[in-house]
Image: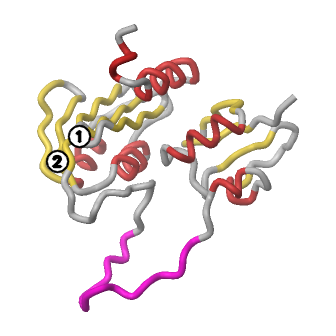
């Protein structure tokens, strides 16, 4: 039998997940070295980077290189795997299902990322230079245990979501990653 892990996000546990699923989560920026995980058979949560098998998913940090041109260095931490050039704008479509309380904190956070417009209840369009993984990571901090979120980067054909449950998560991932030509079959 293969090893499985449970992931803790916002005080809720999700899983169990196989190593293949954990690799997918890491590739999507949903599993980070600081993610809390519990290996099957263990009793104590620990960081993913401290797990013998999961640590291999996170490359060792490279030595910082000097900036190409003089000027202040942005100390803001960058999250997720963003291969876009700095300053490239993306168009996002954000939908939240809020069951736990006020949406005001979420609206405020979305507006911090750039120009946004709420065109339907709990649905926004956003133009931002911030990566999809950073947006999702920051927004889920404003959600309760019953709330759900999906962020779609329409510029780069990417999606990131939170709290849809394992069955919906698997179906969404399969459909999103399927080739467009094959999606109709």
| Cβ–Cβ under 8 Å for marks 1 and 2 | yes
Quadrant, the C terminus: top left
- Dominant secondary structure of the residues highlighted in magenta in the image: loop
Residue 140 versus residue 168: which sits nearer the camera? Answer: 168
- Magenta residues span 61-76
Q: Nearer the viewer, residue 1 or 122?
A: 1
Q: Position of residue 149 (x, y in %)?
A: 38, 32
Q: Which residue matches tag 1? A: 92
* 68 falls in the magenta region: yes
Residue drawn at (57%, 39%), measured in percent from left and top? 24
Q: Residues within 10 Å of mark 1 (few under 14, many from 20)?
A: many
Q: Position of residue 12 (x, y in %)?
A: 60, 36
Quick one: SS at disc 2?
strand
What residue did someone put label 2 on? Answer: 127
Q: Is residue 114 above or below residue 20?
A: below
Left or right: 158 in relation to 169? left
Query: Is 5 placed left or right of 171 in the picture?
Result: right
Name the residue: 77% across, 35% down: 4
Q: Where residue 61 sits: x, y (%)?
A: 57, 72
Kindly report the distance in space between the C-alpha atoms of the residues bearing marks 1 and 2: 6 Å
Q: Is residue 64 above or below residue 165?
A: below
């Amino acid at each position: 039998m293969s090893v499985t892990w449970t992931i803790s996000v916002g005080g809720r546990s999700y899983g169990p997940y196989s190593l293949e699923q954990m690799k997918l989560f890491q590739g999507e920026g949903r599993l980070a070295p600081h993610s809390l995980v519990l290996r099957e058979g263990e009793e104590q949560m620990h960081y993913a980077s401290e797990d013998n098998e999961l640590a291999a998913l996170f490359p060792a940090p490279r030595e910082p290189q000097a900036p190409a041109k003089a000027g202040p260095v942005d100390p803001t931490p960058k999250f997720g795997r963003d291969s876009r050039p700095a300053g490239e704008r993306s168009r996002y479509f954000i939908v939240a299902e809020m069951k736990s309380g006020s949406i005001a904190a979420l609206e405020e956070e979305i507006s911090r990322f750039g120009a946004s417009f709420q065109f339907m209840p709990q649905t926004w369009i956003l133009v931002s230079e911030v990566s999809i993984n950073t947006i999702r990571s920051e927004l889920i901090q404003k959600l309760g245990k019953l709330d759900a979120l999906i962020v779609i980067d329409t510029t780069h054909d990417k999606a990131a979501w939170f709290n849809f449950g394992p069955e919906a998560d698997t179906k969404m991932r399969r459909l999103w990653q399927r080739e467009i030509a094959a999606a109709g079959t």
